[in-house]
Image (tube, helix red, strand yellow):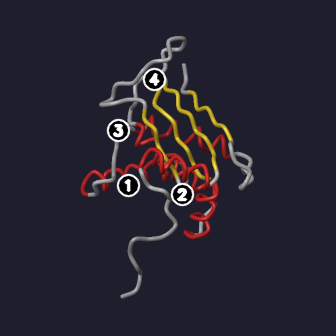
Amino acid sequence: MSNKVYITNHQKAVKIPSGLRILIRRSCNAVLEYEKFEGPAEISVTFVDNAAIQELNAQYRGKDMPTDVLSFPLGENGVYDKNEDTGASLLGDIVISMEKAMEQAELYGHALQREVAFLTVHSMLHLLGYDHEAGGLEAVRMREKEEAVLVQLGLPRTVSYTTDEI
């Protein structure tokens, strides 16, 4: 059995580009493959607007402001509930603010698709137990994994960390 990615759109602020749902599924599968996740998995991805994500951010993180993506992992320490009908591991929910994704795509000078793929990969790593909040080595490792998966998807970072000037 293959992985299932359930995608719903609960916003009208940003038109969902064609192919974006396929890219999200590819992003989820690429993370699972990169992390050598055993067995089938189920993930829920929901598109919302800034007002909805601000409400969730305030409720669950105590931060009364819109953010780009929220992750709601269902597992702990690599142990996940199973869908009794399919045997798939229930990884959790990803909530993406399409308004914020559009703002950030414009800010960073890349396509909305690349931004949503990044947010999906980032959030998938959270669902698998990675956390960058404390900074340090774990944050660096998470960023490296994000970039490796995005390169695999053909969506490398477009800005360099170094300058060519001497």
* Residue, disc 4: 89
Q: How far apart are marks 2 and 4 (CA)?
A: 29 Å
Q: How far apart are marks 1 and 3 (CA)?
A: 14 Å
Q: What element carries label 4?
A: strand
The percent position of residue 126, horizontal first and vertical second, equals: 40, 42
Q: Residue at x 36, y 54 (%)?
A: 144
Residue type at mark 3: give it. Gly
The answer to which of marks 3 and 4 sits earlier in the sequence is 4
Disc number at residue 143? 1
Q: Residue furthest top?
A: 85
Mark 1 or 3: in front is 3
Mark 2 or 3: in front is 2
Q: Which residue is drawn at 28% across and 54% down?
A: 134
* Residue, disc 3: 129
The answer to which of marks 1 and 3 sits earlier in the sequence is 3
* Residue, disc 2: 66
Disc number at residue 158? none
Q: Is mark 1 on a helix, strand or loop?
A: helix
Residue type at mark 1: give it. Arg
Circle 3 packing at 10 Å, graded few (<14), some (14-19), many (20+), is some
Residue type at mark 4: give it. Ser
Q: Is residue 117 above or below residue 9?
A: below
Tell me: 126 left or right of 95. left
Q: How far apart are marks 1 and 4 (CA)?
A: 24 Å
Mark 2 or 4: in front is 2
- Do the CB atoms of the residues marked 2 and 1 lie less than 8 Å apart? no
Q: Residue at x 74, y 50 (%)?
A: 12
Q: Distance between the residues labelled 2 and 3?
A: 23 Å
Tell me: 107 left or right of 159. right
The answer to which of marks 1 and 4 sits earlier in the sequence is 4
Residue type at mark 2: give it. Pro
- Do the CB atoms of the residues marked 2 and 3 lie less than 8 Å apart? no
